[in-house]
Amino acid sequence: MKHLSYIFIAVAWIFFTLLTACNNEEQTYDGPSYVMFSDSLNVCPVFQDNNAYKVTLSATRSASYDRRFGIEVLQSKSNAIEGYHYTMQSNTVTIPAGQLAASVEVCGIYENIQDDDSLNIRMRIVSLDDVEWSYYGIETNVRLKKVCPFVIDNFTRYAVVKSSFLTNYKPYAPSQRLIMTERVEGEPNSVMLRNFMTDGYDVRLTLDNSDPLNPVASLRTGDIIGTTQEFLGALYNDNVLRVTDYVPVPSTFSTSLNTVTLYTVVYVKDVGNLGAFTTTIRWVSDAEAEDILKNGF
């Protein structure tokens, strides 16, 4: 019996050693050799300094020599104009020997792109050499997106609020409100929305532009937007409606249009949620605000 135990231990050790060796073995690609764009869609941010954006090409296998490719702009599938909306550093790109990637640089021209432009560049990889192309990946879209500087003062003073919450719970009142907003002292990226959904209740809004292509807006959780008596016609718990961000869909804002789109949940503490609501906030000039005050929406 003791001898059999030794045998069992030896077999188990051999199996463990082989399994470990297999797991530690370096995995290598042994499929076809393709060259393709790394992404089918590239979003090119266009800043005031007209910075360059890199569109990357990738190869599935390296080669012992430099590989040079042409980048063709498909004008029939593009609406951006080269030389006016953008420039390209070069219409060729080289993947160096032993390497798997290279990139071509696109530079948007900030002053020639409007805030609401939807501009697209369709590119294709071409080569004079015999290349095995992948079914996917030899074409890509480059979308030019103008990104205006983030200035917190552009999100202060008068703003128009339009919300599905007001539509649902104040159906016989205007679904839009003109409010006043102001910076929060000591918080450089926050503003206070005065009388947000109804008079007497303010809500703090914070704007995060750390990722200019995906700016995020958020409300302070638990801020009060009104009373249950006013909006629900009855007294529930502490008689206040509170707001929080709707986590599945992040709220966002536009530095180009000076607008915020909020996705929020309104709730009564210890009772439950009224639902999820969409609210847009659009900052307007003093002249437009005066016209609204005088003539209405």
Image (cartoon, helix red, strand yellow):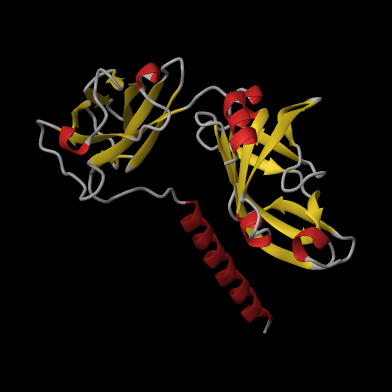
Q: Answer above or below: position of 123 versus 106.
A: below
At horizontal 76% and vertical 65% (from top left) the residue drawn is 232
Percent from the top left, x then y, of residue 160? 61, 39
Does residue 202 appear left or right of residue 291 in this picture? Answer: right
Vertically, is 184 above or below 253?
Answer: above
Residue 53 image position (x, y, % from top left): 39, 25
Q: Residue at x 51, y 31 (%)?
A: 257
The quarter holding residue 100 reads top left
Whole-percent x and y of residue 286? Answer: 62, 24
Q: Please determine whether, in this image, residue 40 is positioned above or below residue 268.
A: above
Residue at 69 percent across and 57 percent down: it is 265
- In the image as oriented, which residue stretches furthest toward the front? 295
Of residues 146 and 106, the one drawn nearer to the viewer in this rendering = 146
Residue 269: where, in percent of width, then height? 83, 61
Q: Nearer the viewer, residue 268 or 208?
A: 268
Q: Is residue 58 visible?
A: no
Residue pictured at 60% horizontal, 47% vertical = 162
Task: Decide if residue 177 is in sight here.
Answer: yes
Q: Quick one: 221 or 96, which is closer to the camera?
A: 221
